[in-house]
Amino acid sequence: MQYAAMELLVRRPGASQKAIGEDLGLDRSTVADVVRRMEAAGLLERSRDPDDNRRNVVVLTARGRTEYMVLTPAVVALQDDLVRDLTGDETAQLRRLIARVLVSHETAGAPSLPEARPGS
């Protein structure tokens, strides 16, 4: 989850917590928890949007950018490992299909997955 948030903030520095949740398909409390933990670890900073005091905007710190750069090769290697038995065309088709499912999910306004309940 934290890597996905870092990747989003690399692409969209200053994204709001709401935008992070929407982009990652997370509810408000989950985003708030992820941001809080990452902030405590020194990976990001959040502040009030000067144009809209109701919004928190989030940026990676230097430590967060460094951590992202360190993690990226391992993430790319894992992704490559997951599709190693597929041809290039099959990998491209899988990525297109996943993107299509995600777009369909977003445009349908489907809710985020429910949070796990203790004991379940």
Image (tube, rainbow, N blue to C red):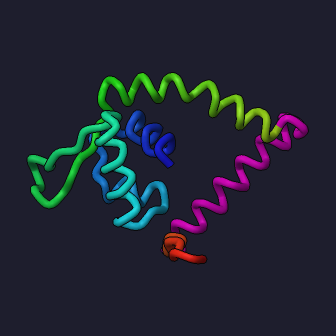
Q: Which residues are magenta?
A: 84-109
Relative to 97, 102 lies left or right: left
Figure check: 20 above or below 116: above
User: Residue 98 sits in which quadrant?
Assistant: bottom right
Q: Position of residue 17 (x, y in %)?
A: 31, 54
Residue appearing at x 19%, y 56% in the figure: 55
Relative to 98, 18 lies left or right: left
Figure check: 23 above or below 43: below
The quadrant of the rendering that contains the C terminus is bottom right
Residue appearing at x 52%, y 23% in the figure: 70
Residue appearing at x 41%, y 36% in the figure: 11
User: Residue 67 sits in which quadrant?
Assistant: top left
Relative to 116, 55 lies left or right: left
2 or 21: which is nearer to us? 2
Q: Position of residue 37 (x, y in %)?
A: 35, 47
Q: Is residue 35 visible?
A: yes
Relative to 51, 60 lies left or right: right
Residue appearing at x 47%, y 29% in the figure: 68
Q: How many marks?
A: 0
92 or 23: which is nearer to us? 23
Residue extending farthest to the front is 119
Does 79 appear in magenta?
A: no
Q: Position of residue 88 (x, y in %)?
A: 84, 34
Q: Position of residue 24 (x, y in %)?
A: 48, 55
Does 102 appear in magenta?
A: yes
Q: Main secondary structure of the magenta part?
A: helix
Q: Is residue 110 visible?
A: no
